[in-house]
Image: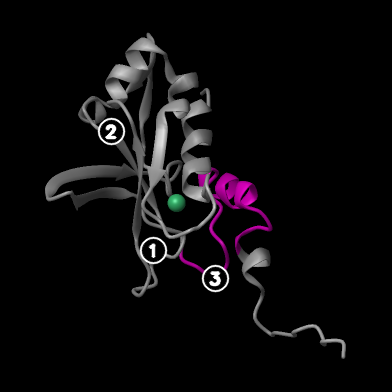
Amino acid sequence: MQRRPRRSFNQSYAQKYGATRAIRADRMYRCITPYPNKVPPPGTVQLAISGRPYRAVFTTDNCYIEKLFTREATGVRLLDFLRNRRFIVVRSQKFNYPTYQKYYIVRLDKPLGYLFDTIGRRYMYRHITSCDCKDYVRPCKHILAVRYALRDIF
Ligand SMILES: [Zn+2]
């Protein structure tokens, strides 16, 4: 017997967030908020990661992937307080839904400052090692989104 297609009045996950992980990651990178989720507010958040306090800065242009770089007359600079960090914070697109994990941690095998100074921004993505989300596929959308953010050239 042929199964009838499932109908729903709610838009599907693929419609809402994007058909593939790459599309979903690109939307996160470009701060496209899936309707009717709320646009995440800019601000600095304090997080305890592995028992230690950290901050992550989110802006209107960095609303899902924390702000990593600033542009100066001399070029792009990594934010100073990130230099010794081996992870990047990604905010969930469901951050305003209380039942979901709000922040995901994308880890790298070396400190961000070391990578920025030695291999440069374009190749830092090669040092991403993991994400703490439950997606069974790697790279997950958080890792992809961080790749896009690292490789973006102002
Ligand atoms: Zn992930």
Is the residue at mark 1 in contact range of ligand 1, meaning its CB lies under 8 Å from it?
no
142, 129: nearer the viewer:
129
Q: Position of residue 106 (x, y in %)?
A: 37, 43
How packed mark 1 is, by other alpha carbons closer than 10 Å (few <14, some 14-19, many 20 or more), is: some
- Mark 3: amino acid: Pro
Q: Position of residue 51 (x, y in %)?
A: 12, 50
Q: Of marks 1 and 2, which one's residue comes earlier in the chain?
A: 2
Q: Is residue 28 magenta?
A: yes
Q: Position of residue 25 (x, y in %)?
A: 56, 47
Residue annotated with mark 1: 95
Mark nearest the camera among 3 and 2 is 2
Real-space Cα distance between discs 1 and 2?
23 Å
111, 79: nearer the viewer:
111
Q: Residue at x 49, y 58 (%)?
A: 135
Disc number for residue 86: 2
Q: Position of residue 76 (x, y in %)?
A: 40, 18
Q: In the rendered structure, which segment of residues is drawn in magenta?
A: 17-38
Q: Of marks 3 and 2, which one's residue comes earlier in the chain?
A: 3
Q: Secondary structure under badge 2?
A: loop
Q: Residue at x 64, y 49 (%)?
A: 23
Instruction: Say above or below: 107 vs 82.
Output: below
- Mark 1: amino acid: Phe
Residue annotated with mark 3: 36
How packed mark 2 is, by other alpha carbons closer than 10 Å (few <14, some 14-19, many 20 or more), is: many
Q: Residue at x 40, y 43 (%)?
A: 130
Q: Is residue 8 magenta?
A: no
Q: Residue furthest right?
A: 1
Instruction: Say above or below: 106 vs 83.
Output: below
- Mark 2: amino acid: Arg
Real-space Cα distance between discs 3 and 2?
33 Å
